[in-house]
Amino acid sequence: MTITTATTAPGVEATAGTATAGTATAETLAADTAERLTALMITFLETGTPPAGLFRPDVFCDLTVPYWRLQARGVDGLVALRRNGHPAPGSVPRHRLDRTGSGFVLEVEERWEQDGAGWYCRELLRADVREGAIARLSVYCTGDWDAGRQRRHGREVSLLEP
């Protein structure tokens, strides 16, 4: 097996490889890692508690919401950032995973109940992975839509796909 390593971001390494039939490639391993981390990330988004192995202890998070940008370093800081914006557990009814050279991009739709009302948002998460865990996370959020905004959107827009 031939593996080449290239630095794609500060402190983040990506691997690409080729192999003969019957041997695992670096791409296969990256797919397994991306799928494992995606499942753990969805658990975190739904519960607010990060499962073991999801984040490196020194993880960096850069969160962009409409009209604002926030950052955190370390698992505790990232969890506090998440809980400040989404204190209630919820669900991720839809997601899409795309692998990159340094990790993956995850598109999610989230729904949750808070103070008796249903909320909704869409997010794009770009994760850089190092040593099997997320080292850097950039999150782009549409903003949280309350029930009124969801109803208005339903009245005024006909989506082509969910």
Image (cartoon, rainbow, N blue to C red):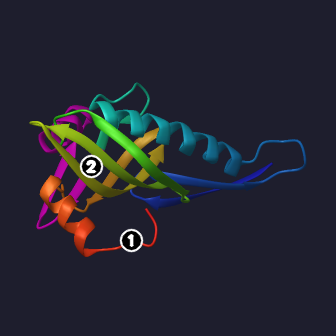
In the image, taking residue 116 as reference, residue 96 lies left or right, namely right
**Which quadrant would residue 51 be assigned to in this image?**
top left
In the image, 39 versus 73, the foreground residue is: 39
Distance between the Cα atoms at labels 2 and 1? 31 Å
Residue 64 lies left or right of residue 96; in this view the side is left
The percent coordinates of residue 71 (x first, y second) are 18, 51
> Measuring 50% from the left and 59% from the top, which residue is drawn there?
7
Q: Which residues are magenta?
A: 60-85
Q: Position of residue 121 (x, y in %)?
A: 26, 55
In this rendered view, identify the residue nearer to me: 90 or 8: 90
Q: Residue furthest front?
A: 155
> What residue is drawn where x is 32% and y is 48%?
110
> Taking 57 as reference, is 22 above or below it?
below
Other-residue count near label 1 (Cα within 10 Å), few / some / many at <14 / 14–19 / ≥20: few
Q: Label 2: which residue?
A: 61
**Residue 79 is covered by the magenta coloring:** yes
Kind of residue sitting beneath label 2: Cys
Secondary structure state at the residue bearing disc 2? strand
Name the residue beneath numbered marker 1: 159
